[in-house]
Image (cartoon, grey):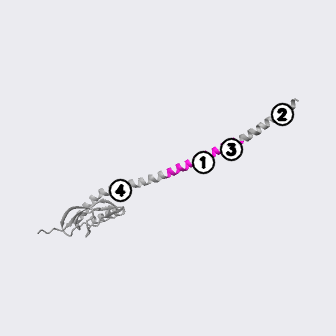
Amino acid sequence: MHDNDDQKVNSGSDSANGANNAGGTQDLDNRLKDLEQKLSEMENNWKRALADYKNLEKRIVEERMEFIGYSNSLLISKLLSVLDNLENLEKHNGDMGLKLTLKELRQILSEEGLTEIDTAGKYFDSNVMEAIETVDGEDGKVAEMVLKGYMLKNKLLRPAKVKVGLKKKEEN
């Protein structure tokens, strides 16, 4: 009888273990699903963080290029007065060395994106010109350029200072 009792106990244990195993399997399945969900969330977070980092890198490069462009525009703006002085000197002095130096300086500035604003025979444009005086002449047309104006990569660096023609009103 003693053996039968053990068998009954073991039989009861086995059926309890079977129930526990079924419950344990479900617990493991639930745990696996939770872990898979957490893994998926972590993977998505990692992808977002990587995308944010790449965007940050791009923004830093853009800001660096913008800063370099701004620095170049400041330097070129300061060089314009030197260019003006050298051009005025060239008018009064026919030195070949000065002409070659000016040619090289103009070439360098041109390669950096500097272009002269053309005012000859043009009508006054307040976007790129500054009227410093009105004189007799065709109404609204540039009569004389006093100081050259420049654009740097399609942005106004210095407006051209001009004298603008103004038709005199006839007095009765």
Earlier in the chain: of badge 4 and badge 3, it is 3
Dot 2, how many residues are within 10 Å of its Cα: few (below 14), some (14-19), or many (20+)?
few
Distance between mark 4 and mark 3 Cα atoms = 64 Å
Earlier in the chain: of badge 2 and badge 1, it is 2
Residue nearer the viewer, 90 or 47: 47
Q: Which mark identifies residue 29?
A: 3
Q: Is residue 67 left or right of residue 9?
A: left
Q: Which mark identifies residue 40?
A: 1
Earlier in the chain: of badge 4 and badge 1, it is 1
Residue at the spot x=68%, y=44% of the render?
29
- Name the residue type under label 4: Asn
- Residue at label 2? 8
- Name the residue type under label 2: Lys
Earlier in the chain: of badge 1 and badge 3, it is 3
Q: Nearer the viewer, mark 1 or mark 3?
A: 3
Picture quarter with the N terminus: top right
Give the SS element for disc 3: helix
- Name the residue type under label 3: Asp
Earlier in the chain: of badge 2 and badge 3, it is 2
Dot 3, how many residues are within 10 Å of its Cα: few (below 14), some (14-19), or many (20+)?
few
Which residue reaches farthest top? 2
Distance between mark 2 and mark 3 Cα atoms = 31 Å
Picture quarter with the C terminus: bottom left
Distance between mark 4 and mark 1 Cα atoms = 48 Å
Q: Where is residue 88 drawn, in percent x and y?
A: 23, 63
- Residue at label 4? 72
